[in-house]
Image (cartoon, grey):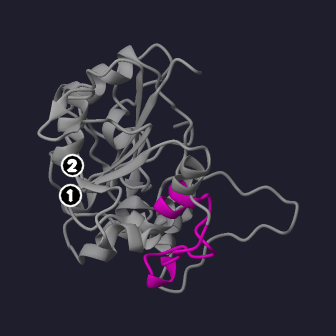
Amino acid sequence: MPQIEHLIVLMMENRSFDHMLGFLDHPELSPLKSGDYPNSIKAGGASFGVTPNADYLIESPDHSHMGVMQQLYGGDSFDKDWRPPTPKAGQPWPPATCRGFVRNYRRLKDVDSGEQAGEVMRCFAPAKVPVLASLAKQYALCTRWFCSLPGNTWSNRDFAIAGTSHGTVGNSLSSFHPFAATVFGRMRDKRKSWRVYHEDIPHAVMYQPSMALRGLNFRSHQDLLDDIKHHGRRDKKQVRRLPNFAWSNRTMVSANRAWPTPATAATASIPDRRGTPKPSS
């Protein structure tokens, strides 16, 4: 697509597709209905399905690899020694029932109340995320874009940056790979400009530590907004330029800003599998 000169990747975290957009009225989606995917603390106990009443801040669900596997495959009965299914070579994985969220959340938070444990099933109503919902309706929406692996943030960001998590499924300093092939290196090889914009310490520093330490190609997120707004204009002694490839590393984002620069494509990605998943989303 030669008409696209700039690509902005807005890398968010800690939400699932259904948690953010599961109740969206969209022509390509079968929206969730209240009560779908019922979870219970114990077999025959009170049931908690998805509901469109999530708030902006909730207690974080378990997003370790084992925790997510319990949520997807655990069902109504698993104990501390539970292990996920392990199909034989060449055999398909069993379908994910998504019935283990409440039990896993109750164990993680050590809560006695079923109502408290049921909070993990809450999703956002579209009115709660108006900008994200509007973007989803007006632009392309990838409804089957799964995270690379069921587990922690770092491993999924490794896949987004380098196409592999180097054999890890959790947050580990073993993710430090300064010489690994990355999307940033591909940009450099093609003589395309790139930059990482961030709020705190960006995960990309695991791959480009020397540039981060010298301040090369790493800028604050405010610089991204300024580069978009003033692209091509002279600022003090230099002309502001939005790079060909911009990686926006946010902790969590309420997508409340537009992208006014011509010939620019923006994509938002959420690497964690958290919240209430649906097999078709």
**Mark 2 or mark 1, earlier in chain:** 1
Q: Say which residue appears at 36% left-offset and 68% top-offset.
A: 62
> Residue 7 location in percent, x, y?
44, 34
Q: Which residue is mark 1?
A: 199
- Left/right of residue 47 with respect to residue 87 in the rendered view: left
> Which kind of residue does numbered mark 2 sit on?
His
> Residue 37 location in percent, x, y?
44, 44
61 shown above or below 242: below
Q: Which residue is mark 2?
A: 221
Mark 2 secondary-structure assignment: helix
143 shown above or below 65: above
Seen as rendered, the residue at the extreme right is: 90
Give the magenta-colored segment's residue range: 157-180
Q: Say which residue appears at 61% left-offset and 57% top-offset.
A: 163
Mark 1 secondary-structure assignment: loop
- Left/right of residue 161 with respect to residue 38 in the rendered view: right
- Left/right of residue 261 with respect to residue 68 in the rendered view: left
